[in-house]
Each structure stands twice: as C-alpha cells, then as structure tokens.
Amino acid sequence: MEIQANKSKQTFFVQEGGLDLLATIYNFASKKQYPLATICEHVASYFNNKQTELEMCCLSCLWVFSEIEEDRSLVLKKIGLEPFIHSLLKNTPDVDDDDDWTCDVVHASSGCLAGCAEMPGIPQVLAENHEVLTKLFWLTCNAPDDFQKEVAANVLFCCSNHPKAARKIIENQRHCLVLEKAQELELAREDRSALSFTPGVAYFLSLFLANIQTLPEENLLPYDEMQQINQILEAFLHIVTPSEIGRLEAEHSYVWISLIPFLQLALAGPSGSFGTANERLKTRPHVSVDPRSEIGTKPGEKTCDAEISNNRGIGPYNFSPVEKIGLFCLCHLANASENRELFKKEKLEDYLICVCWFAQRCPEVVDLTPKLDGFERLEPPRLESIAKAYLSKCFGEKIM
C-alpha cells in the first residue's frame, strides 16, 4: 500500500513537470562555478557554496525519486548518466568545512549511481571508467560515515554485475584494490574488532569479488588471486550472518530491481573452472546426486529413490565459497516480502526450490539453506527449470 501511494505521488510529480524542472535546476547547479578571482572572493565563495548546496538537494531528491525500475529509467532518460559521474568526481575538501557541501554532493551522487548501476548497459559504462571505480573505492574506505561507505561499496558491486563489466574490471586491474582491502576479513576471522569496515561494506565487497571470479566467460584471474578470493569469502561467512545484512537492508530500505545476480552466485557452478564455457562442458565434474530423485518433492521431503541413492553411498553436493555467498544472500532476501514478490515477478521460484534441494544435500551449508515458508502456493519446479539449475550448478552453465 505504501509503495502504491509513493508511486501515485511520483506519477503526479512527473505529470506536473516536476521532474523536468528538477533536471533543469540540477543541470544549472552542477555546472562550473564562479572563479574566485573574477569578483570579490567572499561573495564568490558564498554563491559557490549555495550552488553546491542546491546541487546536493537536487541529487538527494533524485535519489529518493529513483526507487523503482521505471523511475530510474525515467531519470536516466531526462538527465543521463554523465551528470551523476561529474558530481561523484568532484574534489572533496581535505579538512572539515561546515560551509562546504561537496562531501554531501559526492554521497548523494553515489546514491543516484547505485540505482542507475542496476539498469541495463550501465555496469559496462561504469566499469570502463577508471576514475569512477577509483573514487568509489576511495569512498568505501574514507567516506565520513558508515552508510556512505556502504552505498559506495554497493555501487562497486553493481558495477561488477555483468560479464563484460567484470572482465573490464579485471583487465584494468581495478579488482586488486578491493582484493587488498578485503583481506582484512581474514584477520578479523579470529578477532572481529580487527575489521576496519562494517558488515555492510564487507558484504558488498565480497559480492564484488564473487562476481569478478565467476561472471567472465573465461577465467581471467591467476590461481593465487582465486585462492585469495575464496579465503576472503570463507572468512566473511565466518564473521557475518544473513540476519545482520537483512536488518541492514531493512533499515535503509534497499530496493532491488532484480534478484538474478544473487541467484547466479548460488548456482555459479564448480569452483576454479578454467577455459570457456564450451571447454568446461567437455569435462564432467564429480556430481554426487541425481536431481531426478527430487522431482515433485518439496524442500525437506525425501523420496524412496533419494533414500536408495543415499544407500548407494552417493555423497552430498559441494558448494564453492562463491556459491555459499549466493546462498547467504538468498537466506536474507527470501525473508523480505517485497523480495518474495520480486522473485515471483522474475519467475525465479523454480530455481529457489532447486537451490534448496542442492543445499539440503550438503551438511556444510545447512545453515545457509533459504527458508521458503513465506512464499504462498509454491509449485514443484518445471522440468526445464530443474535441467537449467542442474547445468548451472554442476557445469557452470550460464542460464540467466
């Protein structure tokens, strides 16, 4: 009901020309400011600060406005991506200045980019911009408060959500910055106080690294970096719980426009695959359970065939650290009603059930098995969905 009410208000705002006017004001406010040498320096500084404050107000409004996919698409159509990038890359003062709004401009622009980065084609554009990735990483480490750091880390994650974007990040060595920073998680495994960033930042950096390792069509990372990423992901899972991230997303009203990136991680396939997708298919990995024994059963139920398979000594599925991170995500995402609606909208329920089947066969991830109690009238998965999930889990095939 609340979402529908907000949507009605935003529709009225657009129909009355509010968004067009806001775009015009933002376009003015974000432009080049008065040179201090041309007029009285005190007067120029005053007007420049007020112009920056106006820019911040516009960005804050656009951030709040861009809640759902349709509104984000409209903002990109009216304003484009470049103005937000321009605002993000503004230089922040080295010392605190109560009259300087530049830090607030940078934060609000990163919030706008977090929404834009989920839209088609945007991750590739951002991933090719060295300055953007470097600034986002700098904010992740140096922003003045934890929420700003988490927003910047979220944008980094969204930038890695496409195979071509992930490949570009690797080719330009931008992932090395995150990899080095995230190694703190290994130190914090024994003492969480050794961690210099929040669970939210750790979450998004871990998702970024998981994407970097699995999304490119062929493996581009050296073996030692893959091992480092696996160790970081395992450390994260040891330190942070799904409920912590669920509370964080609820507190800050996160709205995702697609849950496919999280499901892809849970079905990422065998760890450490090398070569192209076709080359990987030529070598069948060890698969321990025939999913046909599970067809027609609900998560948690067992069939006679399943029991026979167990008696033949067939062991559990193995889950790579990347797939465990995917399970971790699904655990807290499935608990939120708005996310359950999005799973239904994207027709992902079949794959969720298959993920649960796979996870229930692995004692190591029993605590990371998503709970589907909140879903109404779940039907057994279609055979097509079961086959696709099987190919993804066991062979690393891209199915979404």
Image (cartoon, rainbow, N blue to C red):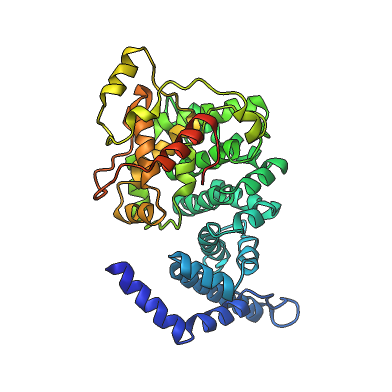
Taking 313 as reference, is 81 left or right?
right
Compared with 30, 68 (above or below) is above
The residue sitting at 46% across, 44% down in the picture is 262
Q: Is residue 378 left or right of residue 358?
A: left
Q: Quadrant of residue 244?
A: top left
Residue visible at 52% across and 48% down in the picture = 153
Q: Position of residue 102 (x, y in %)?
A: 58, 65
Say if 90 sits above or below 49 in the image: above
Looking at the image, is 175 positioned above or below residue 91? Answer: above
Quick check: can you spot residue 241? Answer: no
Q: Nearer the viewer, residue 39 or 165?
A: 165
Q: Which is nearer the eye, 158 or 93?
A: 158
Q: Position of residue 177 (x, y in %)?
A: 63, 40
Q: How many marks?
A: 0
Report the quarter where the N terminus lies.
bottom left
Residue at x 39%, y 21% (from the top left corner): 316
- For the residue pair 107 and 176, the one nearer the viewer reads as 176
In x, y percent, where is residue 105? 55, 66
Q: Furthest-bottom residue in view?
A: 16
Give residue 278's position: percent from left, percent from top: 64, 34
Left or right, 290 with respect to 371, comes to: right
Tell whether 134 sits left or right of 153.
right
Answer with the quarter of the image where residue 356 lies.
Answer: top left
State whether residue 216 appears in this view: yes
